[in-house]
Amino acid sequence: MSVLAPAGSDPYYRLTWRKPDGRRGGTSGGRTLDGAMSKAAPIDASLARAMGPRGLTPLRDLVTEYINADDQNQREEGAPWSGNHLTQVQRRLNRMIRGREHVQAMQLDRDLADILRSQGGTRNSVDHNTSALRGLLIWGHRHKYFTAEQAEMLPPGAVRVVPALKGTAAPKRASRARDVSENPNFIRDEDAPSIARVVALATEFDKIFPAWGRLAVELACDAGPRWGELFQLTADDVTFVKRGAVIAINWQIDASASVREGDNRRKLPKGEKTRRTVAHKRSITGYKLLKELRARCEQARVEQAAGTNPEALLFPAPRGGMFHHSPFHEQYFTPAALAAGWPTQTWVETCDEWNSDTRRYERVSRECVQFDLVWHSMRHRFARTCVDVHNLQPGQLTAVGGWEDTNVVNERYYRSGREHLESVIAAL
């Protein structure tokens, strides 16, 4: 960086420097030396942070290159991120750089980093922003966008900044007392929908989807598929045996897949583990599950032949394809669960939302609903039924439910603490 004194009739100081890509840069320094030095300081600091030509990359382009790379994961195993996680990171980074997309990589210092990560409405969102920005800095240093000093300016445990945007955190779900010897993760019977609530929700879904509404709810509670596994099932995934049906769960819906871009909307189930599960002749509600499942498989093949359900999906969306998670819950589950009387909490959310037309944040308020029991809670009903009614052992439940291992299953569904009391009584 050079600060040149006024020359000739020109009363202004001049600042000149060599850019990281070799080009010359220059600007006016003002009429006073102090003013020129003050203006030169941040430019000189930015140049000192530049690793090379890539230090000139605008944050907008840098985020795009980061998201499109194949080595974002900083962990030792380096496994590629899931599509969902990649989408979340992209949204957080794009939210952080709004209004600052033109800022160059070499200009990113701790003050600006704190401004970027404060672009959230709650403490959780600030923490998520910090993690995403830290990942970008480390990756950027590896690829010559940032210096080592820049990459290390947000270490784990960095001081949390105050959210710069207005947000309202969702209320915590209702808690309850636990027995002193009960595992903290144990799922009691009351943590799952009661039989009455299952029937009520199934009845409401039957009104929305007469061809399969109740069957979907009953199968979720009886066979335990997760939402994304259930709503991609086809007639070919079901094999009927003497006393029930075996259901192959080889895929789940990929929430990050883009229909517009022609992506495959299926991916391997959670943990990349396929499995087989079983549907019983009658569900715990008394519903003739096997009979209705057989009829639905036959109907799906008829729909396939007619071209209205190309994949013979058991539970197709209105246009014959697979559902999308958020619209399904907003348009179908929420109104059905409310009509069924499932317990909820309501609150008014006030937050700042970005207006892409005005390029400004605007404050909005809306009433929100949070369910104490969500769709996934029907998986807990499945597990409690397997344990309490069918007397499955941990290994058996793990096999049909697709959990990571028996340790998870033991903590959630078996370790009620009752065994400790029974051993004490036996010792008397």
Image: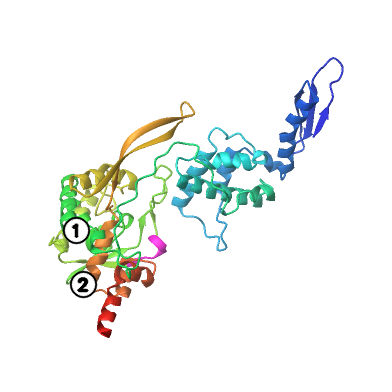
Q: Nearer the viewer, mark 2 or mark 1?
A: 1
Residue in the picture at 21% in, 45% down: 338
Q: For this view, does 96 lie left or right of residue 345?
A: right
Q: Is residue 24 found left or right of 87 in the rendered image?
A: right
Q: Mark 2 or mark 1, which has the lower sequence index?
A: 1
Residue 396, by quadrant, is: bottom left
Specify the quadrant that holds the N terminus: top right
Up the image or down, 205 lies above or below 77; here it is above
Secondary structure at badge 1 equals loop
Q: Amino acid at mark 2?
A: His
- 271 is within the stretch colored magenta: yes
Alpha carbons under labels 2 and 1: distance apart: 17 Å
- Answer with left or right where residue 234 lies relative to residue 122: left
Q: Position of residue 128 (x, y in %)?
A: 49, 48
Camera sees residue 174: yes
Residue at 74% x, 42% y is 48
Of all residues, the one furthest to the front in this rendering is 428
Q: Is residue 213 magenta?
A: no
**What residue is disc 2 on?**
390
Q: Is residue 210 among what the camera can see? A: no
Magenta-highlighted residues? 269-275
**Residue 121 drawn above or below residue 172:** above
Q: Nearer the viewer, residue 411 or 206?
A: 411
Q: Quadrant of residue 51?
A: top right
Looking at the image, residue 145 lies above or below residue 42: below
Residue ID for mark 1: 194
CB under 8 Å between discs 2 and 1: no
Work out whether residue 299 or residue 373 is closer to the camera in this orientation and state it: 373
Residue 322 spot, x, y in % from top left: 31, 49
Farthest residue, direction top: 9
Q: Mark 2 falls on what kind of element?
A: loop
Residue at 64% across, 51% down: 152
